Structures are given as structure tokens and as C-alpha cells.
Amino acid sequence: MLESIAHASDLTKSLFLLVVGVTGVYTTLALFYLMIKILMRAFKDHDA
Amino acid sequence: MDKLFVGFAHIGLPQIIMYIIGGLLIYLAIKKEYEPMLLLPIGFSTILVNLPLSAVLEYEGAPGVLKILFDAGIQTELFPVLIFIAVGAMIDFTPLLANPKMLFFGAAAQFGIFATIVIALLVGADSLKVASAIGIIGAADGPTAIFVASKFAQKYLGPITVAAYSYMSLVPIVQPPVIRLLTTKEERMIRMEYRDVKVPKPVKILFPIFVTIIAGIIAPISVPLVGLLMFGNLIRESGVLERLSKAAQNELANIVTILLGITIGSTMVAEDFLQPMTLVILLGGLGAFIFDTAGGVLFAKFLNLFLKKKVNPMVGAAGISAFPMSARVIQKMAQKEDPSNFILMHAVSANVAGQLGSIIAGGLILALVPLLAG
């Protein structure tokens, strides 16, 4: 997929970056969200 | 005799304009207190490097002091990376750990970065790398902007840094009109319930370690960025390295900031700065902040279509990284509509999420752009 985009115009590449970038940020932060939820549950009895 | 007056022969209109720009940056730093820690050294350095023969850059064939600092600290990315340790030691992730839903606002408000990359290309950025360096101004996070720009567009490092720090200090002016345009009075008056959640110490310690591992696996190139930020945070949260934590927050931050500011200013040479691209950078940076704000607000409005307990859409705008200024702006706007409405803690959580989101966005740009640009 990246190979076909690599031959496209810079504008097409930037649109691809927009979609993949925004999705990537959401996905990564969603993983952080899950991680925080798991950690908070795992250590709920510990002192703050 | 000619050699005595050689300086006069090397002064032209471009140099005089740069002295005025340098003076303006110093004025904004001192009189208006717009990010003085960076704008003052950059302003002074702008004057230094545009003096006749620029001895601070090169003298009789040997590199000058600012060139040496640039090669050692910017070319190698050492200064921005060291700043990340200091920033990490300053960030308190507790409000975010207590209210992790706000992470999604931190993601939404990064939209401006990517939208600006597209627009920068449309209005004249000469490559995807340069457009990305302009877009990253929207990270509202100086060190991330410097780090990405030093990788992709070293030639424009000066104007990109000036734009990033200037707009960060202008958040109280840039954000409110965009928020008012996209929200109704009723929406701005929405109240949000706040529950005081205690965050256990092991969570605060494990968080920076796990974030580093996850970010490092998703975008390995982001490790210097995320890893050292989280290292700084781990020093802070460990509870056993208080001296080092304070050193990172004070001595390290201060020394690197001085060196970073004066070194970045060394890129503000008239021939490079007085170009149409500088205008594209300044306008692009402003656009990035506007799109970030709009992205956050519109995401919150979208969520409200499905939520029973509505979110005040202004909180979405706090998802940019300009901490704590953006959160304060949102609280001020909320209280203007309803003096008894208190959404500061939600805005702070979104703001901290924005700090994380901006670095992740920076990491993704660092990983994706070289693959696309070839």
C-alpha cells in the first residue's frame, strides 16, 4: 500500500497522512486508555 | 583603512529588517511576556547572526560559536531531546490518569497538525517534509515542533520555532473566537460532574514505562521523543529521585533552554528568513492552531449526539498541548457564560492528554513521512 502511495503526488500523500495520522493518534491513545483502565483496576487497593 | 570599516559594507536593508524582527521578538518577550524564555534568546540571536560577516557563525574559515552549538545540539537533536527530559519531569499525568476518557480529546485536537500539512502543500510548501514541519506547529508543543523541524526542515527551524512559541502564547486570543463560532451559548453552559479519583502510586510509576513501550513498538523512531519525556516523568513519579527531578525541572531545563533559544535564533539569517516561505509558515501555524481547536470542539459535539451526560464542547478545545493556558482559557469562557460553572479539572485532563497526543502525532509524522517522501 505504501509503495503505491510513494509514487503519488505530494498532495495525495498528505491526504493519506491525514487519514493514517489521525487514525494512528486515536488508536495509540485508545491503547493508553485501556492500559490506564487495566492499571487502575489492578492497583485499586493501593495507596495514592 | 577599508578593513576598519568593512562592517558598513556588509549592512543592507535585509539586515536592518532582521534587526527590527529581532528587536520585536525581544520586545514581545519583555513587554508582553510572550514565551520570554525562548523568544528573548531567539530575538537576540537574530541580531547576532545578521551582524556584518556573522562571526558567530563563521570566522576566517573556522566555525563560530553558534555554528558549533548548532552542529552539536540541533543537528544531533541533542538539545530538543534533553528538553524532553525536563518537560517530562514537569508534567503531572494525575488528572489524566484519574479521567482517562479525556485522552480522546487529546487525540481529536491533533487534527490541525495533519490538516495543515495538506493546506501547506496547497499554498506553496516545497515538499511533504517541509509541509509536515509546518503542520507540527499545531502540536502546540515547542520541543516537538523543534524536534520534527530539525529532522525535516532545518532551514526553516527559526521561523517554525518562532511561530510555535508565539501562537502558544497567543492561545487566549486564537482559541475563543473559534470556540464561539462553533458552539452555542447553551453548549458553553453545559455543566460536567467531577469525581475526585485517587490515583495509586504504582499506576503513576508504570504509566511512563508502558507508554514508552507501546509508543516504541508502534513508531520506533519516536523513542527519543516519547522515551526521554517518559524518563523525565519516571524520575518525577518514582519518589526516590527528588533531587534529580528538581535538577531536570530547573537546572537542566534552564541551561538547555538558553542554548536552544540562542542556537535556533542562529537560523534566522536574512537570506533564509526573508522568503515567501516564512509567510507560509506563520500562516500555516495559525491555521494549525485554529484546526486543532475546531477538531477538539467538533469531536465533543459529535460525542454529544450519543452521550446521555453531555460534554461541554469547549473541553475538546483544551485537547491541544498548550498547558495549562488552554485549560485556563476554557474555564474562563465557561465562567463568562455561567459564573458558577466549574469545568477546569476536565479541561486540565484534556490539556494533559493533548501533551501526550502531540508527542504521539509527532512520532507518527517522524515514522510515516520518510516512508511516503521516499
Image (tube, coloured by chain):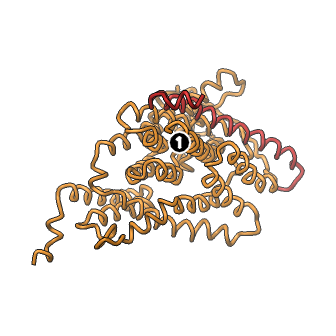
Chain colours: A red, B orange
Whether residue B229 appears in this view of the structure is: yes
Q: Is residue B106 above or below residue B37?
A: above
Number of marks in the rendered image: 1
Residue lying farthest right?
A: A45
Residue lying farthest left?
A: B1
Residue A5: x and y, percent? Answer: 53, 29
Q: Residue at x 39, y 64 (%)?
A: B41
Residue B329: x and y, percent? Answer: 52, 44
Q: Secondary structure at mark 1?
A: helix
Residue lying farthest top?
A: B305
Q: Residue at x 41, y 64 (%)?
A: B262
Residue B264: x and y, percent? Answer: 41, 59
Chain of the residue where label 1 is placed in the rendered structure: B
Q: Residue at x 71, y 48 (%)?
A: B211
Q: Residue at x 55, y 41 (%)?
A: B365
Residue B342 relative to residue B268: left or right: right
Locate residue B360: give its quadrant: top right
Residue B22: x and y, percent? Answer: 31, 59
Q: Nearer the viewer, residue B343 or A7?
A: A7
Whether residue B102 appears in this view of the structure is: no
Q: Is residue B138 above or below residue B162?
A: above
Mark 1, residue position: B370
Tell me which amino acid carries mark 1: Pro
Quarter holding the N terminus of chain B is: bottom left
Locate residue B61: give its quadrant: bottom left
Label 1: how many Cα within 10 Å (few below 14, some 14–19, many 20+):
few
Q: Nearer the viewer, residue B220 or B236?
A: B220
Locate residue B130: give its quadrant: top left
Q: Is residue B20 above or below residue B183?
A: below
